[in-house]
Image: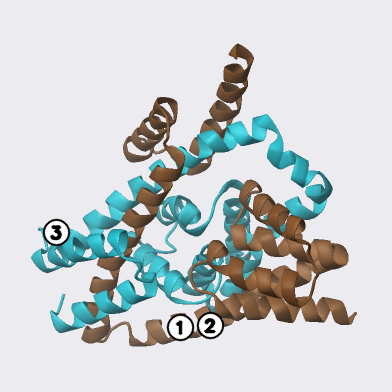
Chain colours: A cyan, B brown
Amino acid sequence: MTLFRLFYEFFFIGLVSFGGGLATVPFLRELSARTEWFTLAELADMIAVAEATPGAIGVNMASYAGFRVYGPPGVAAATLGIVAPSIIVILVIARALTKFRENRFVSGAFWGLRPASCAMICSVGLGLIREALLTPSLDIKAAALLALLIPAALKTKLHPLALIVFAAAAGVVFKM
Amino acid sequence: MPEIILLTLVFARVGVMTFGGGYAMLPLLSRELVEKRAWLTESEFTDMIAVGQCTPGVIAVNMATYAGYKCAGAWGGVAATLGLVFPSAVIITVVAALLSGFAEYPAVKHAFAGVRVAVCALIIKTAVTLWRSSVGSLAAGAVFAVVFAAAVFTGLHPAVLVLGAGTFGAVFSVRRSVKK
C-alpha cells in the first residue's frame, strides 16, 4: 500500500511540475507537510544528496525520498512514479510536440509558469533558511557560513558539489 | 533488438557521468547522439531540448524519452529513460543506506548541519537565476508577487499555483497579442 502511494504521489509530481533542477522542491515540501515521510530538514538533505550524485536532480530527489520511506523497493516505486508521466505524455503527443512549443497559448502559459516556479522556490528557500539558521535561536556559525556561501554561489563558477563538500567540512570542523 | 540495448547503455553512461541535471547533460548528449552515432540531426537535438522544457516532469527525463523515441520508437523512449535513471537510483540507494547507517555519529550530524546551509545558498542561486530569466516585466513581477504571497501565507497546493499561473499566462498573452 505504501509502495503504491509512493508511486502515485511521485507520478502526480511528475505530472504537474515543470522545469529543471529544483522545480519539484515546492511539491516535495507539500508532501513533507502532508505525510510523515520526511521533515523539512530531511528535505534539505535530500536536495544535497541529489545535487551531489550524478543524474537528473528531480529524479534523484524522488529516489532518495523513496528510500527513506520504504528502502530499495521504495526507490523503484518513487523513481518509476516520477518518470512515468514524462514517458506517457511524450509518447502520446510526440508527433505534435515540436509545433506545440510554438503555440502561443503554450508559450504564454510558460511566461506565467516561470515566475510562479521562482516564487515557490523562494518560499521553500525561506523555510529552509529558517530551519538551518534558527535552532531555535539564531545560530551564529550557520549564519556566518551562509554569508560566506551566498557570494561563492552567486559570483563564482564553483560547482554545487564543491560548496556542499566545503560546507560539510566546515560543519565538522566548527561542530555546527 | 540490439539498438534498444545500445540506447539504454548510452543513456546510462550520460546519467552516471553528469552532475547537475538536464542542462549539464547537453554537451555529452550532443556528442553521443549527434556527433558519434548520428541518431539525431542538429535540428532534432534542438527539438529535444524544446520538448524537454515544455512537457511536464523532469527535463532530463523528457529529453531522454524524446530522443529514445526518435531513435527507436516507443520502446526506445522507455529504454532511454530507464537507462538514464537506473545508475542514479542504484547510487542513491547506496548513499542513502550509508547515510542512515551513520546518521547517529556526531561528525555526520555536524556535517549535515553545514550541508543544510549550503543547500540554502544553492536555493538562493537557483532563485536568482530563475528571477533573471523569467521576471522581465511588471506583469511577470506581479505573477511572482501573487504566487509568493500565496505560497508563504496560504496552504494552497503548489499544483494549484502552477495551474493558475499557467492559465493566467496563456490568457494574458493571447489578450495582449489581440490588442496589438
Amino acid beneath label 1: Val
- Which residue shows up at 34% across the image and 59% down it? A40
Q: Is residue B120 left or right of residue A27?
A: left
Looking at the image, residue A12 lies above or below residue B147? below
Residue that mark 1 sits on: B95
A42 sits to left or right of B166: left
Q: Identity of the amino acid at label 3?
A: Pro
Subunit ID for the residue under disc 2: B
Q: Are marks 1 and 3 in contact (CB under 8 Å)?
A: no
Q: In the displayed structure, would residue A48 be above or below residue B48?
A: below
Callout 1: chain: B
Residue A108: quadrant of the picture: top right
Q: Is residue B105 visible?
A: yes
Is residue A146 found left or right of A100 in the rendered image?
left
Residue at 50%, 54% (x, y): give it: A24
**Residue named by callout 2:** B91
Q: Position of residue B2 (x, y in %)?
A: 87, 82
Q: Vertical placement of A108 versus A97: above or below? A: above
One can see residue B89 in this view: no
Q: Secondary structure at mark 3?
A: loop
Q: From the image, which quarter does the N terminus of chain B lie in?
A: bottom right
CB atoms at circles 2 and 1 under 8 Å apart? Answer: yes
Secondary element at image label 2: helix
- Label 2 amino acid? Ile
Count of numbered tags: 3
Where is mark 3, residue-wise?
A136
Q: Residue at x 57, y 48 (%)?
A: A18
